[in-house]
Structure formats: C-alpha cells, structure tokens
Image (cartoon, rainbow, N blue to C red):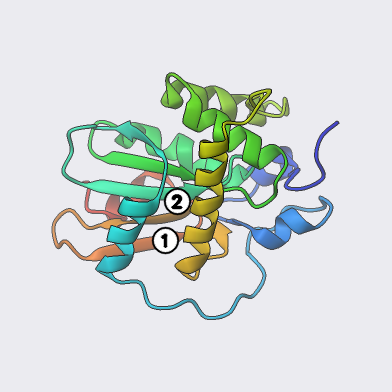
Amino acid sequence: MKSAALSFSLAGALALTLGACSKQDADIAPATPQSVSPAEPAAPALTLSSYDKVGAEGKGFTAGAMMSAQTIYVLFDPQCPHCGHLWRQSLPLHNKVKFVWIPVAFNPGKSLGQAVGLLSAANPVEAMTAHETSLLANNGGLLPPATLDPALEAAVKKNTDLLASLGQHSVPFILGKHRVTGELVSNSGALETEALANKFGLN
C-alpha cells in the first residue's frame, strides 16, 4: 500500500517546470502537487561555512566527475518528483563536475527506507537512476531494505536536521561554489541542465 506521505502524482508533477517539495507536502494527504513551497520563516544567510558544514556533516553518494575539484551538494528526498527532475537534468553534466547527493527524509516511512537503500547500494548512481525511472513509471521507486541499517538511518535523520539548520525547508536544495568566481551559489528547487550549468559556471 502506497504511503500517503509524500505520495506525489508524478504525472502532474511532470507538468511543472521548476519546483520543490516541502516538509508540509509530506504531512498532508496527496492532492495536487505544489510547485511552490508554503511560506517559511526567513532563512539565515548562507556563507562559505555553510558549504563546509554540508561537506563535513552530510552523508551522501557521489556522482559525476569524481576527480573534479568542484563539488556541488544536492539535498533531496527520494519521493520528491522535483528532485528526480533535477537528477535527470544533472546527468549531462556528470563529465564536468562532482555532485554529492545527500538524501533527507521528510517522513519516517518510504522516504527514509529509500534513502537508506540508496546510501547502501553497491552502485548508488545506478540505483538512483533505476529509482527515478521507477518513480516516473508510477512503480513506487526503489524497494527499501527489509531491515534498515541503524547507522545509515541515523545519517539520513542527521541529513534532514542539517537541511533545517541551513534554514531550508524544501528540496531539492543545491549548494556549491561558482567555478570561475569561487562565490557561494545556492538554489532551492529544480533547474534545467543549461540553467544548472550557468549557475555554477560549468559552461
């Protein structure tokens, strides 16, 4: 039986261009997907120390150019369709930059199990692609492990707290440095490939 929490209509979500999934989306029964998150308190200003904090405390998996000196962090929920859209749009950039995908879980059900499953996968990139393909086909995504690794479960919960500590309440949340200027760059919500490349100086 599909969990009510974060059970988004993927067909409807595909009609949305840019958007994000919020904690509030996970706390209510599914209806029409929201392209804009409900109002949240003003987020604290992000600094380079925020970037360092995510790198030090976030638990994720690496995709893309493993040897790249430029790292872009993406905090995401496995059940968020906008996160899946960003994953697909990031694939053409895997030869240019290193992405670290850090799973959070806005509910203790399916999202948490799938987040643990992705972190424990032998090949997380393949697992993530298969997961998003399954979600797109309305097949529910990755089957969570029968028993969740307590350490990874705790790591996902810590990731979720990390997102909140940055003053962010929706995913995907992207954080990195511009390749040319070195300036901190962040974005809340999905981006198309070209916009993602432009934002982080990958062109």
Residue bearing mark 1: 187
Instruction: Identify the residue at horizontal 53%, vertical 41% (top origin).
Output: 85
In the rendered image of this protein, does residue 75 appear above or below residue 167?
above
Instruction: Identify the residue at horizontal 58%, vertical 27% (top origin).
Output: 131
- 120 and 203: which one is in front? 120
Dot 1 alpha-carbon crowd within 10 angstroms: few under 14, some 14 to 19, many 20 or more: some
Q: Amino acid at mark 1?
A: Asn
- 57 and 21: which one is in front? 57
The tally of labels here is 2
Residue bearing mark 2: 191
Residue reaching furthest front?
A: 150
Is disc 2 in contact with disc 1, using a CB cutoff of under 8 Å? yes
Instruction: Identify the residue at horizontal 73%, vertical 29% (top origin).
Output: 138
Q: Is residue 80 left or right of residue 60?
A: right
Q: Position of residue 107 (x, y in %)?
A: 69, 49
- 46 and 49: which one is in front? 49
